[in-house]
Image (cartoon, rainbow, N blue to C red):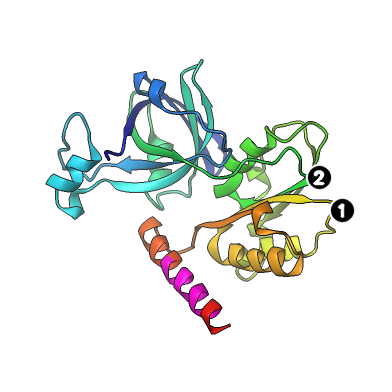
Amino acid sequence: MARRVTELEVLRTERLSPHLVRVVAGGPGLAEFPETGYTDRYVKLLFPQPGVEYPEPFDMDRVHAELPREHWPVQRTYTVRALDHDAGELVIDFVHHGDTGLAGPWAASAKPGDRLRLVGPGGAYAPDPEADWHLLVGDESALPAISAALERIPAGRPAVAVLQVDGPDDELKLPGDADLTVQWLHRSTAGGDPDSVQLPDAVRALNFRPGRVHAFVHGEAIAVRELRRHLGRERGVPRDDLSISGYWRRGRDEEGFREFKAAERAREEAAAQAG
């Protein structure tokens, strides 16, 4: 079955913080982009290889069939921060650290009219309105999904967010009407390896509220591994009440991260079989 590619164009961009760039895209192609009930709705952005001509209309199945692998577009996974069909706008927020990476520099230099191709959406999480309280943990990569979740938590319902950014200037005003408690963590004030330890240490120190928690925990892969153990084994959060996975790993691009995740799954399966 053909994988549908949505073709959009950049309408405008906005610098939200020193390290976060918002791209608003639209155009006729957005009309067929589906709504979903998920707040972690994600898409695969397709970045063309320089100098390669692709079939028109663009078709990923034709690309895979007709072009060598090294000519296939590079894929990067991003969360849809917002979708408004009435306004004709789809919003994606990009982490930008100078010239590092592919998607961040593209977003920082994007101009109205630039083409944006994507495949999706996927997703699996939305905050349960029946939960007694909500726990939202992540770094910049998870901020779009966490912000979308906060907009869906019922007014006055307790929520605790533990969020990691580079420094105070990267803190954002968070949306929604939940009874929200926020703890911002700054890499710039931490020693050692903050990406791997800062979030787990902060969550271990939390005083959990009574009642059933629905948790969303996403970010750097090693930190997420520690949080999975802590929340599942030590806090006793049931698997069905926990959306948790790594979004990235420092020092690896998305292709390298996929290899890392495959190795992690193999390690976990071997450990489970060993008892």
Whether residue 164 is visible, yes or no, is no
Q: Position of residue 152 (x, y in %)?
A: 68, 33
Given the image, on which type of amino acid does mark 1 rest?
Pro
Q: Name the secondary structure under disc 2.
A: loop
- State which quarter of the image contains the C terminus: bottom right
Pick whichever of labels 2 and 1 is earlier in the sequence: 2
Identity of the residue drawn at 58% across and 47% down: 142
The picture quadrant where one finds residue 260 is: bottom left
Residue, far bottom: 274
User: Residue 132: which numbered mark, if any?
Assistant: 2
Is 116 positioned to the left or the right of 144 in the image?
left
The picture quadrant where one finds residue 1 is: top left
Seen in the picture, residue 26 relative to 229 is either above or below; the reply is: above
Identity of the residue drawn at 40% across and 49% down: 99
- The question of residue 269 being in magenta is answered with yes
Whether residue 130 is visible, yes or no, is yes
In the image shown, does 53 or 167 lie closer to the viewer? 53
- Majority secondary structure of magenta residues: helix
Q: Name the secondary structure under disc 1.
A: loop
Q: Specify start and end residues of the magenta stretch as a single range.
A: 262-271
Dot 1: within a 10 Å radius of its alpha carbon, few (fewer than 14), some, or many (20 or more) residues?
few
Residue receiving disc 1? 210
Identity of the residue drawn at 40% across and 20% down: 31
Q: Position of residue 153 (x, y in %)?
A: 72, 36
User: Residue 142: which numbered mark, if any?
Assistant: none
Dot 2: within a 10 Å radius of its alpha carbon, few (fewer than 14), some, or many (20 or more) residues?
some
Circles 2 and 1: CB atoms closer than 8 Å: yes
